[in-house]
C-alpha cells in the first residue's frame, strides 16, 4: 500500500474536505459544517488545512486557523487547531496522529509559540497539550439576576456587526477579528460548538454591552433550559441584567458564565448578587511550541509587570523532548526554579485550577514570578474551532 503523506488539499478538493467533516461530525445530515465554522472551512483558509488521501479522496483532516490575539497589550499569534477527523473506514490506523505531528511541525516552522486545540482526547495529550489557564465559571439562578430597567436588548444580526465592534475592540483579552469575519460568525447562529445567539444591549440608544450565548432547548422550542455566556464585551453589569431578562423571557432555569480569572468587573457584578466563581481551565487544551518565542511576544507585559530591569534579569529557558516542552527553568540572580513535567510547565506559565508549580520557588524569585505570571489566554468565544 502506498504511504500517505500529509499535504495541503487542492482547490478542487475543497468540497471533498467539507464532505469528510460532515460525514464524521454530522452523520445524520442535520447541519453543514462549512456553514457552522465559516472561518475554518472557507476557501481562502485551504492553505492551512492538511489531509491524508486514499484512492483520490481525503480520508483524514486537521484544520488550522491563525488566531491573532490582543492579550493585555501584547500581540500574540496562536495556532488554533480543530475539526480533526478521520473517516470511519480508515480509523484505527494512526492517521490523525500523523497529521497532528505534521501540524505541530508546520506551526513551529511558521513561528507560532503556542497552540490551542479544541479538545482533550489522548491524541492531543500524548503530544503535550493539556487543560490549563486562569479562568472562572459562574452559575446562577436567573431569578437572582438584576432587572434590565432602562436597557434595550436586541438580537444581533450580521448587518449590525459594526454596532458591537467598539465594545469588543476595547476588551483587554481577545482575539483580533475583522468586522467582516465577525459578521460571518454571527450568521451561523452557532456559539462554541452549540446552537446560540448574540445580543446587543443599549441604553438610550447607545450600545453598552454585547454577549454571545449557547443554549440547550427543551422539547418545547420556545423554552431554553440553560444559557452559557461564552463571549462578551462592554459593561458586565448591563450584560448580567440583559442575560437575566432573556433567561426569564425564555424560561431558562440555569445561567453559566465564562470569564477570565482577573476580570474584577465581572467578579464584582456577580458578587453583588451573592454568586462566587469556581476556578476553571480553558475550553481547549494548550500546547507549547516555543517558550522563548512566546515570552518574547509577552515581553511588553513582563516589562510592565516587573519593570524593565527585573524583566531583563529574569531568564526563562526550556527543554523540548519529542516535540513537547517538558522542563522550564526560571532564574533570577542566584535563585533558580526548575519546573518539570508537561502539565506542570503549562500550569506555571498559564495557571491551572489545581496545580501550583510556583509554590516551590525561592522567596525572591517566587515574588517576581507571582507578579509576572500567569500569562493571559483568550477565551475561544466565537473563534471556537
Image (tube, helix red, strand yellow):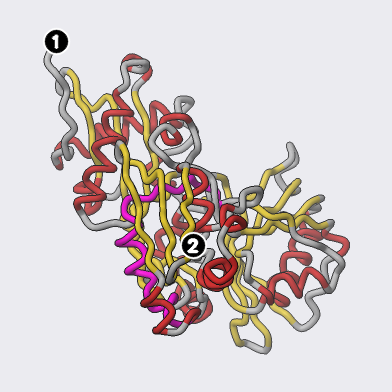
The residues bearing labels 1 and 2 have C-alpha atoms spaced at a distance of: 43 Å
Give the residue displayed 59% in from the left and 55% down from the top: 360
Give the residue displayed 27% in from the left and 24% down from the top: 59
Residue pushed farthest top? 1
Give the residue displayed 79% in from the left and 51% down from the top: 254
**Image quadrant where residue 295 sits:** bottom left
Question: Is residue 141 placed above or below 21 in the rendered structure?
Answer: below
Tell me the magenta residue range.
282-304
Residue pushed farthest front? 334
Residue 223 horizontal/vertical position (percent): 75, 48
Q: Nearer the viewer, residue 357 or 218?
A: 357
Residue 372 horizontal/vertical position (percent): 51, 71
In the image, taking residue 152 as reference, residue 194 lies left or right, namely left
In the image, taking residue 78 as reference, residue 358 lies left or right, namely right
Label 2, on which residue? Answer: 378
Image disc number at residue 374 = none
Give the residue displayed 82% in from the left and 67% down from the top: 145
In the image, taking residue 305 as reference, residue 253 lies left or right, namely right
Among the two numbered marks 1 and 2 on one chain, the one whose residue lies closer to the N terminus: 1
How many C-alpha atoms fall within 10 Å of the one at disc 1: few (<14), some, or many (≥20)?
few
Q: Secondary structure at mark 1?
A: loop
Label 1, on which residue? Answer: 1
Q: Nearer the viewer, residue 245 or 83?
A: 83
Q: Nearer the viewer, residue 277 or 164?
A: 277
Which image quadrant: the N terminus?
Answer: top left
Amino acid at each position: 500500500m502506498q504511504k500517505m503523506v500529509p499535504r495541503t488539499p487542492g482547490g478542487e478538493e475543497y468540497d471533498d474536505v467539507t464532505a469528510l467533516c460532515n460525514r464524521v461530525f454530522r452523520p445524520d445530515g442535520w447541519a453543514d459544517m462549512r456553514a457552522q465554522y465559516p472561518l475554518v472551512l472557507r476557501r481562502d483558509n485551504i492553505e492551512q488545512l492538511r489531509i491524508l488521501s486514499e484512492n483520490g479522496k481525503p480520508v483524514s483532516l486537521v484544520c488550522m486557523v491563525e488566531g491573532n490575539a490582543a492579550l493585555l497589550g501584547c500581540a500574540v499569534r496562536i495556532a488554533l487547531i480543530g475539526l480533526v477527523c478521520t473517516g470511519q473506514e480508515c480509523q484505527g490506523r494512526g492517521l490523525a496522529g500523523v497529521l497532528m505531528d505534521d501540524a505541530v511541525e508546520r506551526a513551529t516552522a511558521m513561528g507560532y509559540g503556542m497552540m490551542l486545540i479544541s479538545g482533550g482526547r489522548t491524541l492531543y495529550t500524548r503530544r503535550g497539550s493539556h487543560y490549563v489557564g486562569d479562568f472562572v465559571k459562574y452559575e446562577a439562578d436567573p431569578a437572582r439576576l438584576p432587572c434590565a430597567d432602562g436597557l434595550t436588548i436586541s438580537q444581533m444580526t450580521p448587518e449590525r456587526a459594526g454596532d458591537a465592534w467598539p465594545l469588543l475592540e476595547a476588551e483587554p483579552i481577545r482575539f483580533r477579528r475583522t468586522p467582516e469575519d465577525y459578521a460571518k460568525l454571527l450568521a451561523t447562529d452557532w456559539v462554541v460548538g452549540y446552537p446560540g445567539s448574540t445580543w446587543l444591549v443599549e441604553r438610550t440608544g447607545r450600545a453598552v454591552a454585547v454577549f454571545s450565548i449557547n443554549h440547550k432547548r427543551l422539547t418545547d422550542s420556545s423554552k431554553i433550559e440553560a444559557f452559557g455566556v461564552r463571549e462578551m464585551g462592554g459593561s458586565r453589569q448591563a450584560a448580567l441584567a440583559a442575560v437575566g431578562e432573556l433567561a426569564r423571557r425564555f424560561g431558562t432555569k440555569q445561567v453559566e458564565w465564562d470569564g477570565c480569572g482577573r476580570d474584577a468587573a465581572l467578579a464584582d457584578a456577580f458578587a453583588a448578587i451573592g454568586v462566587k466563581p469556581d476556578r476553571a481551565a480553558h475550553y481547549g487544551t494548550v500546547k507549547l511550541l516555543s517558550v522563548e518565542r512566546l515570552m518574547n511576544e509577552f515581553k511588553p507585559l513582563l516589562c510592565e509587570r516587573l519593570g524593565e530591569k527585573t524583566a531583563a534579569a529574569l531568564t526563562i529557558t526550556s527543554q523540548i523532548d519529542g516535540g513537547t516542552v517538558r522542563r522550564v527553568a526560571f532564574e533570577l540572580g542566584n535563585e533558580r526554579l526548575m519546573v518539570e513535567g508537561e502539565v506542570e510547565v503549562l500550569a506555571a506559565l498559564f495557571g491551572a485550577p489545581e496545580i501550583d508549580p510556583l509554590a516551590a520557588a525561592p522567596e525572591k524569585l517566587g515574588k517576581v514570578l507571582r507578579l509576572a505570571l500567569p500569562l493571559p489566554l483568550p477565551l475561544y468565544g466565537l473563534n471556537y474551532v
